[in-house]
């Protein structure tokens, strides 16, 4: 990887058939060197990296929790270290409530806090870490993903 090639960091790529993995594959097809992330190694990160490499693209993985300041900074820094820059940040990581957590009275405060930490704090932290690099480069793009659940309510769904 040379420092003049475009690179992208995509969070929340732990599922082979997930949106994050598809975004990463698409960016790789467009010529980006892609760094994909997830919180746990048990997911499909390495399989997504292998798919991208098999298709002729460039990808690598890094683990981290976007809700943790040091981890968010490390993931961005690792992208810059590996590729000399960060051109695109896709905040795709999410912590949805599980089934059975729809009724507000059933939602544990710890579950609520985790959703807020990943879904709101995480994009803030990764953006804060990436923006200085993008400003120095004079170019960058940030895509913050969200669920359509925020647009429509559902009976008994307090989330």
Image (cartoon, rainbow, N blue to C red):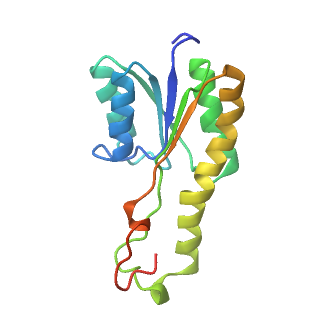
Determine the residue positioned at 33% across, 23% down.
29
Give the side of residue 11 with respect to residue 86, left or right: left
Pinpoint residue 13: horizontal percent, then vertical percent: 41, 43
Pinpoint residue 27: horizontal percent, then vertical percent: 39, 28
Q: Is residue 118 above or below residue 130?
A: below
Q: Is residue 103 above or below residue 129?
A: below
Pinpoint residue 28: horizontal percent, then vertical percent: 38, 24
Pinpoint residue 23: horizontal percent, then vertical percent: 37, 37
Determine the residue positioned at 36% across, 80% down.
100
Report which quarter residue 41 is drawn in: top left
Q: Residue furthest front?
A: 151
Determine the residue positioned at 52% across, 73% down.
111
Report which quarter residue 141 is drawn in: top right
Q: Is residue 153 above or below residue 28?
A: below
Q: Residue furthest bottom?
A: 105
Give the side of residue 44 with respect to residue 128, left or right: left
Q: Nearer the viewer, residue 154 or 71?
A: 154
Determine the residue positioned at 54% across, 10% down.
2
Report the number of discs: 0
């Amino acid at each position: 990887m040379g420092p003049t090639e475009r690179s992208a960091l995509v969070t929340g790529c732990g599922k082979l058939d997930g949106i994050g993995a598809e975004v990463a594959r698409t960016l790789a097809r467009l010529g980006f060197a892609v760094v994909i992330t997830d919180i746990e190694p048990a997911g499909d990160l390495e399989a997504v990296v292998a798919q991208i490499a098999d298709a002729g693209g460039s990808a690598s993985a890094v683990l981290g929790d976007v809700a943790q300041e040091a981890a968010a900074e490390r993931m961005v820094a690792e992208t810059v270290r590996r590729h000399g820059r960060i051109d695109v940040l896709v905040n795709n990581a999410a912590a949805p409530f599980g089934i059975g957590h729809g009724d507000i009275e059933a939602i544990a405060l710890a579950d609520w806090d985790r959703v807020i930490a990943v879904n709101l704090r995480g994009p803030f932290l990764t953006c804060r870490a990436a923006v200085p690099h993008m400003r120095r480069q004079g170019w960058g793009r940030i895509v913050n993903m969200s669920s359509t659940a925020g647009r429509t309510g559902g009976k008994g769904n307090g989330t």
